[in-house]
Amino acid sequence: MPNRYYAGNTLAGFFRSSTAVVDGLTTAGWFDSAYVANAINVLGGSSTANYIESPVFAASGTIWWVFELRANSLSGNSCYPLWAYNGATNAYRLSYNSSGCMLEYWNGSAWISGMRVSTTDPSSARVRVAVKIVCNSEMRIYVGGVELAAAAITGITTGQTAVTRTQHWTVNSTSGNCAFSQIMCADYDLRDSRFMAAALTGDSASNTNGTGAVTTINETVLDESTGVSLTTTAHKRGQTHAAITVPVGYVIGAAVLNARGRAAGTITDGKLGFRSGGTNYSSSGRGYNSGYEPRGYIIENDPNTATRFTQAGFNAAETYLEAV
């Protein structure tokens, strides 16, 4: 079974470095409206200090990332749309500026750089970027599905053997920004994969515990003062979502539920779940703590049928949050 480490298109699935990172950039051309309705906007800084960060995961061997990137003010400036760590240690990263892409890995004391290769400037057009890393072996980059072979780094022997978190950094310019959308990370080739977002549209008629209506929590811009509140163990509050139309030639490879949250008082953790075929299917505890943090739950199959989600099955399913 493939490992899917994280995926998202809003701040529900990511940490943020500061409030300079916001959801809801809806400028035409900065995201692919056939799949998502917005991008995550990361405002520029004087030292590229703004970024979004994945939840913690555990990956080794082959790791793939794919995302769409649109940037502003790259001329004379750089961004690091992918910066991977092994714990607190630098591991691998991608540098992007108006002159092109460059891959780098950390050898324990310094960054070792490959060749910077000219490609589409994301300040002029949105680009779809995929990065493949074989830990302590090689790095490769693909733009629009095509490898920039000259940028590859092979024969790595002093690199990190695992990755546990990823940051996506903005441009080092206070007048610039980077917009990220359709971000995915897994252990298989993601170049042909797409992240399609299904917006929450209503409250479940089945899982009704606690408080927090969709109209309260489904913010265009993240607001941590509002949300679902569950104060009794095993209580669940659910949501319905908009229907999707699966494009011709695609299948639903997995369903992803992301939710920022925290645990307090007698509630020690939280679970995420899908309701399908009239039955609730909960994740294990997601490791929520006393601070607001993102967590995700990715399932490959429809739990009601143990087979791949059909379009109808996905559209009929609900999501929910559960107190532990």
Image: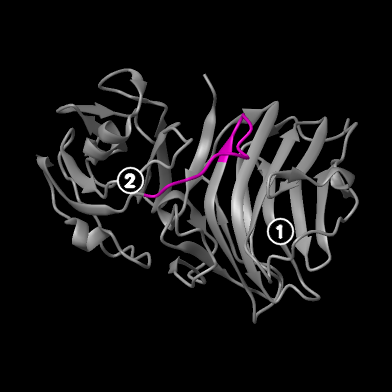
Where residue 41 sits in the image (x, y, percent)? 52, 67
- 10 Å neighbourhood of mark 2: few (<14), some, or many (≥20)? some
Q: Please state which amino acid type lies under the numbered disc 2.
A: Ile
| Highlighted magenta segment, given as a residue range | 185-197
Q: Which residue is mark 1?
A: 80
Whether residue 91 is visible to the viewer of this picture, yes or no, is: no
| Residue 286 position by quadrant | top left
| Residue depicted at x 14% and y 53% | 211
| Residue depicted at x 61% and y 45% | 66
Q: Is residue 71 left or right of residue 252?
A: right
Q: From the viewer's perspective, is residue 218 above or below residue 186?
A: below
Q: Which residue is mark 2?
A: 244
- 10 Å neighbourhood of mark 1: few (<14), some, or many (≥20)? many
| Residue depicted at x 47% and y 36% | 250
Where residue 142 sits in the image (x, y, percent)? 73, 45
Which comes sooner in the sequence, label 2 or label 1?
1
250, 216: nearer the viewer: 250
Location of the C terminus by quadrant is: top left
Q: From the viewer's perspective, is residue 84 above or below residue 217?
A: above
